[in-house]
Amino acid sequence: MMDKVRPLAELARYRARRKLTTQALAEEMGVSRITVWRWENGKRRPDKSYALRLAEMTGVPVLEIMGVTE
């Protein structure tokens, strides 16, 4: 059984603060708009390289972005 991935609400809030669309953030990250939507809605987790970049951009800890919990 696959565990449910928690949505990255912090990413959506970051995007909103910067007044970025999913498309604009996707272009900045070098991914598709659908990929950003999946990250924000808990359908997928970013891989390590994207998680590191998102952590730098948003200030959210990389382990949290990757869904690693203690």
Image (cartoon, rainbow, N blue to C red):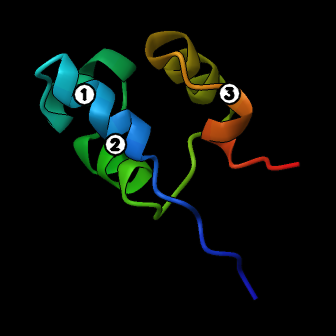
Q: Which residue occupies the extreme right position in the image?
A: 70
Amino acid type shown at disc 1: Arg
- The crowd level at tag 1 (other Cα within 10 Å; few <14, some 14-19, many 20+) is some
7 relative to 27, above or below: below
Horizontal arrangement in the rendering, residue 27 relative to residue 39 (left or right): left
Residue bearing the label numbered 2? 36
Residue bearing the label numbered 1? 15
Amino acid type shown at disc 3: Val
Q: Earlier in the sequence, mark 3 or mark 2?
A: 2
In the rendering, at what x and y percent does residue 54 appear?
A: 50, 22
In the rendering, at what x and y percent does residue 16 appear?
A: 18, 29
5 relative to 16, above or below: below
Q: CA distance from mark 1 to mark 2?
A: 10 Å
Give me the residue at 56% from left, 41% from top: 46
Q: Looking at this view, is 12 or 37 the one in front?
A: 12
Q: Quadrant of residue 1?
A: bottom right
Residue bearing the label numbered 3? 62
Kindly state the secondary structure of the residue where label 1 is placed: helix
Horizontal arrangement in the rendering, residue 48 relative to residue 16 (left or right): right
Amino acid type shown at disc 2: Val
Q: Looking at this view, is 35 or 58 the one in front?
A: 58
In the rendering, at what x and y percent does residue 41 appear?
A: 37, 59
